[in-house]
Amino acid sequence: MFTLVTGVTLATAAALSVVSCSDSRGESTPVREPTPQEEATLERAEQLLLRECMRNHGFEYWIVSDDSPSPSPSGPREFRYVIDDPDWAAEHGYGSGLQREATESQESDPNQRYFESLPKERRAAALRAANGPSPVGLTATAPDGMEFGRSDRGCQSWADRELYDDLPAWFQAETTVDALPQIRYQRVVGDPRYQEAVRPWAECMGAAGHDYATPTEVRGALPPPEDPLPREEEVGLALAEARCALDSGLAATAADLDEHHGEELQRLHRSAVEAKHRLQLDALPRARSVIEEAERMSGRQ
């Protein structure tokens, strides 16, 4: 679908304060993480609710099929700190071809095509229907103190409220948890142990004929995916990065630090993480009801 606004940055705010999850005796109650199948159920129900709401506002909305084949092991991958898989690098380089495929897939999305086909005035109305009108009615503070806002009206907020019941609590928990991966990345690359491990990697890259101080510097020097390096050059650079990551020890150090800082952030923001999980688990019966009702209605047609 055309982009739904999940949060708009408002201003820098004070440090995050979240409500802890505890029982009547004040003791922490463990909350399990939803399974991938349960998350898929929630996503499916959300899409069905969005379709219902958008149609009620006079707009079409298509639910992208969720039974498409899973990506192959050599398909899109995220190398957060450094490419550390020579086999993947030999096949994909820096993934410019995969990025172009992803862009083409987005451009062929029926919701995006529908939105772009609308007259200008109808586009604005569709965005208001999806994201809600101004002013902002929801606010949430991320762990770095940045404040985000979103309308508490519109189809996205209606769908979230139908599923999670407590819309402000959901928006706050989601905002907090969604911010953690970027904070984790910043902590890892700012860690003195990572910076120390980068030095032998840079020396290895220099010996291979590539003068880069960090993997981030390589990313910044790459051309856009639509106008990539010649394939042989892209693959050669990616292979050098991967081999040097393994030979220098940078890959192992980055993995260790990623786990360390990830666990630390989970502890620091445990209440927000568990609040999100609890809201998701509580929403599952409602999600299943939404799906069952949609299937009944589909069977009548």
Image (cartoon, grey):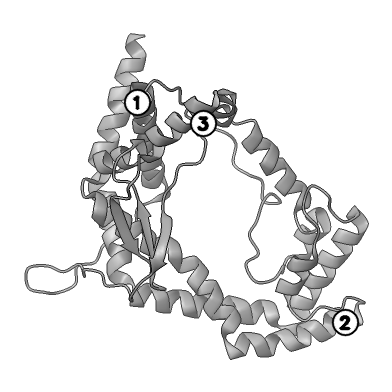
Does residue 256 appear anywhere in the picture? Answer: no
Q: Is residue 127 above or below residue 74?
A: above
Q: Which residue is mark 3?
A: 64
Viewer-side label of 2, 1:
1
**Mark on residue 206?**
2
Image point 35% across, 24% down: which residue? 57
Residue type indicated by callout 3: Val
Residue type indicated by callout 1: Glu
State which quadrant residue 130 falls in: top left
Image point 79% across, 60% down: which residue? 89
Q: Report the Cα–Cα distance between label 2 and label 1.
A: 57 Å
The quadrant in which the C terminus is found is: top left
Q: Say whether marks 2 and 3 touch (CB < 8 Å).
A: no
Pinpoint residue 253: horizontal percent, then vertical percent.
Answer: 63, 82
Label 3 secondary element: loop
Residue type indicated by callout 2: Gly
Label 1 secondary element: helix
**Tag 2: Cα neighbours inside 10 Å, few (<14), some, or many (≥20)?**
some
Q: Report the Cα–Cα distance between label 3 and label 1.
A: 15 Å
Pinpoint residue 227: horizontal percent, then vertical percent.
Answer: 83, 50
47 or 112: nearer the viewer: 112
Viewer-side label of 3, 1:
1
**Mark on residue 52?**
1
Label 2 secondary element: helix
Pinpoint residue 138: horizontal percent, then vertical percent.
Answer: 29, 53
141 or 195: nearer the viewer: 141
Image point 72% across, 41% down: which residue? 101
- Position of 203 compared to 264: left or right? right
| Chain-order first, disc 2 or disc 3 | 3
**Tag 3: Cα neighbours inside 10 Å, few (<14), some, or many (≥20)?**
few
